[in-house]
Amino acid sequence: MTMSEVDPRGDMELSVALIVPCTEAEGPGRRWALWFQGCPLRCPGCCNPEMLSFAGGRRLPAAAAIAGFEQAQREHGIEGITLLGGEPLAQARGAAILARAARQRGLSVMVFTGYTLEQAQQLGDPAVAELLACTDILVDGPYRQDLPERQRRWIGSANQRVYFLTDRYRADDPCWRRPNTVEIRWRPGELTVNGFPVSTPMGPSRRR
Ligand code: SF4
């Protein structure tokens, strides 16, 4: 089955660690962000160790995730979605469904992966190819705690590269020069922190 044959409103299930309906700390503008649960990589110093196990998280139909960013588009005027984790490429089929659906709704797509772009392409997975084809900004490579990034916004370590896979964004866009931010949300029984700083003992933090 090719990705084009996958019904984006079907019952494909995602394993999800966290969703933030509207954030300004995970890429350009206001974005709906989804952290996948599960990562086969083990970067020393990983900022989201609670998202590494494939046994954790919650199951969510792709259709429900799509409905979530449709709602965020209506209510918050988001300009795009960001997929991170955990490892989006470990759930490439589901990630590609979300990315394609986002594109169809005029939203941009930003993806953080621990694989390099070359490694991702060499996986030979049609779903990964589909995901990359629907991605505007790709941040690649494992987190290196010995190479902390000091300059580039949203990037965890200096080895990671930013690819502008479409012309929707540019490296010299003003948003890249603004300082990093951290967002803290409290709902009864749940405290979430995303953005920088990269780690917190309080709950889900962020990426690589
Ligand atoms: S930093 Fe990212 S790629 Fe590395 S182990 Fe953690 S979630 Fe996986």
Image (cartoon, grey):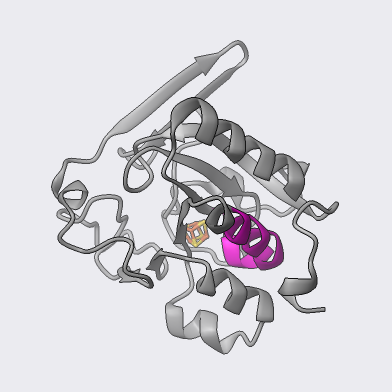
Q: In this view, does 125 lie to the left or right of 204?
A: right
Residue 201 seen from this side: no
Q: Quadrant of the C terminus?
A: bottom left
> Was residue 125 drawn as part of the magenta stretch in this picture?
no
Name the spot of residue 27 as percent of width and height, x first: 35, 48
Residue extending farthest to the top is: 188
Task: Decide which of 106, 100 is in the foreground and name it.
Answer: 106
Q: Residue at x 74, y 49 (%)?
A: 62
Magenta-tinted stretch = 85-101
Q: In this view, does 80 lie to the left or right of 1?
A: left
Task: Decide which of 149, 170 is in the foreground and name it.
Answer: 170
Q: Which residue is drawn at 67% across and 74% down?
A: 127
Name the spot of residue 51 as percent of width and height, x first: 60, 47
Quadrant hosting residue 173: bottom left
Residue 107 seen from this side: yes
Name the spot of residue 36 as percent of width and height, x first: 61, 51
- Picture layout, residue 45 above or below residue 59: below
- Picture layout, residue 143 above or below residue 14: below
Task: Decide which of 38, 19 is in the foreground and name it.
Answer: 19
